[in-house]
Amino acid sequence: MADVAQVAGVSTSTVSHVLNGTRKVSEPTERAVHEAIKATGYTHDRIARSLATGRTRTIGLAMSAISNPYFAELAHAIEQEAAHAGYSLLLADTHDDPERELRATRDLLGRRVDGVILAPSSEPTPALDLLRKRGIPVVLIDRFAPVELDQIATENVASTARLVEHLTALGHERIGMIAGLRGLATSEERIDGYRRGLESASLSFDPELVGQGESDVDHACAAVHRLLELDRPPTALVVTNNRMTIGAMRALREASLSVPGEMALVAFDDFEWADLFHPRLTTIAQANTQIGEQSVTMLISRLANPELAARRVQLEPKFVHRESCGCRGELPLIVPGHDRVATRA
């Protein structure tokens, strides 16, 4: 560290403050220190620092990141914000499975993370109990849970209802739904939104029109095929996450059905390829960057002040209007909602 200080022309204490984030320094000084670190090849000993301070400046992220492209985008936003705040990120894939979630949590605790950001499974209690016993701050993302913890997620009910209402406005009365993994809060909320959308059009809920896609490509493909085999198959589909959208489109292609000519299609989750498909997909786009950034901000503020009241933030997604719904002669239109629907202490 002394070599870094000499090259940068600052004191060793200033180098320490830059490395550990323990005091604000000017941008030119911080830049000079980082350039000196690069020039000298200095490696910061985080383990020694953690022993001295009890902090590693490391955040654990537990989610199904590898198996779900939506979470990969969210993880990127979290990593960027954590790095900006001077924290490293450790990722553990839960595969949305309670046992793997608990194992991932144990692994992160074994690496002495300062806090955890968790996308909870259908049964997160064992993992949350472990975090509470260890006194580790946690922020829940993507799915709300009935616990007094910091949480941030997307509004799912009204936004799913909006997809259904858009299809009913186009004249559809047999609207199928491909539901996500059973037990997840997001899956239940989107089913609720589907029912509300039907009710608003005075249409009855028909359970045989709800296919179980289990948040998986292959399951969603099979679920669509089952819906197509009904005596009165749907004329439109609402698919409730991006992985299942791929499976639904595969099933429609295998059945030689055109979208939207023979089957209208709308989906929850916008993704990179949605604007490249033919036809382009009408979707609900979640505020991934905002969720990622705010989850890190919430966790860091919790680390600084453990006595804060639990916060619950719900962000409204955007309705992205393209052509797969069957609207003719329209250009893509993004209709923005409010960035934040509700914040409750």
Image (cartoon, helix red, strand yellow):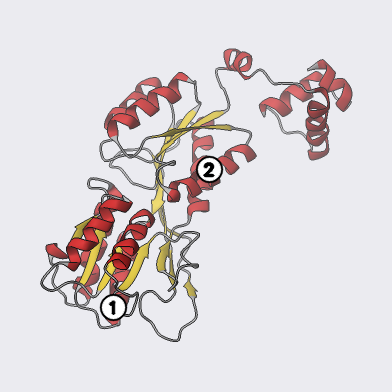
- Residue farthest toward the bottom in the current orientation of the protein: 329
Q: Is residue 334 left or right of residue 252?
A: right
Residue toward you, 244 or 160: 244
Query: Mark 2 or 1, which is nearer the eye?
Result: 1
SS for tag 1? Answer: loop
Q: Position of residue 138 (x, y in %)?
A: 42, 33
Q: Quadrant of residue 250?
A: bottom left
SS for tag 2? Answer: helix
Q: Quadrant of residue 342?
A: bottom left
Mark 2 closeness class: few <14, some 14–19, many ≥20 residues within 10 Å:
many
- What amino acid type should be assigned to the residue bearing mark 1? Glu
Question: Which residue is located at x 80 percent, y 19 percent?
Answer: 12
Q: Which residue is mark 1?
A: 262
- What amino acid type should be assigned to the residue bearing mark 2? Ile
Q: Quadrant of residue 63?
A: top left
Q: Which residue is mark 2?
A: 78
Q: Position of residue 126 (x, y in %)?
A: 28, 28
Q: Position of residue 294 (x, y in %)?
A: 51, 46
Residue toward you, 251 or 193: 251
Can residue 192 be seen from the camera position used here?
no
Q: Position of residue 204 (x, y in %)?
A: 13, 72
Q: CA distance from mark 2 to mark 1?
A: 40 Å
Question: Which residue is located at x 36 percent, y 75 percent?
Answer: 325
Q: Is residue 104 above or below residue 175?
A: above
Question: Which residue is located at x 66 percent, y 17 percent?
Answer: 45
Counting residues from the start of the chain, the first of labels 2 and 1 encountered is: 2
Residue toward you, 129 or 148: 129
